[in-house]
Amino acid sequence: MNITKTPYEQLGGENAVKRLVSRFYELMDILPEAYEIRKLHPKDLSSSENKLFMFLSGWLGGPSLYIEKYGHPRLRKRHMPFTISEKESKQWMLCMTQALNEQVADEKLRSFLITQLTQTANHMINQ
């Protein structure tokens, strides 16, 4: 029997996604190269961290926590109030790529996630 696991399961489930998101925001806080994207976030990142965890949980094939609490993500619409240029998109991906490189051992899965998240980050560009 060949049962395909979701990316959520391949990552290791809830705890692994939480670690990934936590590391992502740690990097956003400490990398000087992420200055512009960090400025778009509140001083306290806990709400942002929780929302990204809930979103990624469902996006990766796990529980649809974000949709259950907030409805359809409508990512582009929800990000419209913020000025997001190619610079901010690349900075977001810099943090996410480093977090993925540190947290995801499976090279094929990591590459897939980087590709998919890059497309999503590019879709957020509104300037």
Image (cartoon, helix red, strand yellow):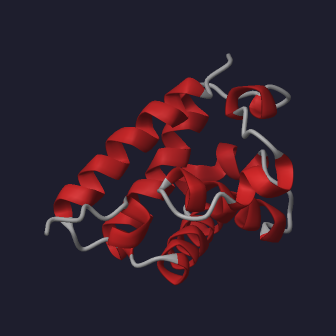
Q: Which residue is drawn at the image coordinates 65% and 50% (left, top)?
A: 35
37 with respect to 78 (left or right): left
User: Is residue 49 rendered to the left or right of residue 9?
Assistant: right
Q: Quadrant of residue 42?
A: bottom right
* Residue that sits furthest to the left in the current view: 1
Q: Position of residue 112 (x, y in %)?
A: 28, 48
Residue ID at (76%, 33%): 79
7 or 96: which is nearer to us? 7
Front one among 15 and 127? 15
The residue sitting at 77% across, 60% down in the picture is: 48
- Most extreme residue toward the top is 127
- Hey, which residue is sitting farthest bottom in the picture? 15
Camera-nearest residue between 110 and 9: 9
Provide residue 105's location: percent of width, then percent of height.
24, 74
Q: Where is residue 95 drawn, in percent x and y?
A: 49, 57
Instruction: State the quadrant of the C terminus.
Output: top right
Left/right of residue 4 with respect to residue 21 in the rendered view = left
Residue at 28%, 58% (x, y): give it: 110
Against 102, residue 70 (above or below) is above
On the image, the x and y values in percent for residue 126 come to 68, 19
Left or right: 83 in relation to 61: right
| The N terminus sits in image quarter | bottom left
Total of numbered circles in the picture? Answer: 0
| Above or below, 12 relative to 28 | below
Q: Is residue 116 above or below residue 105?
A: above
Query: For residue 10, what is the image quadrant?
Result: bottom left
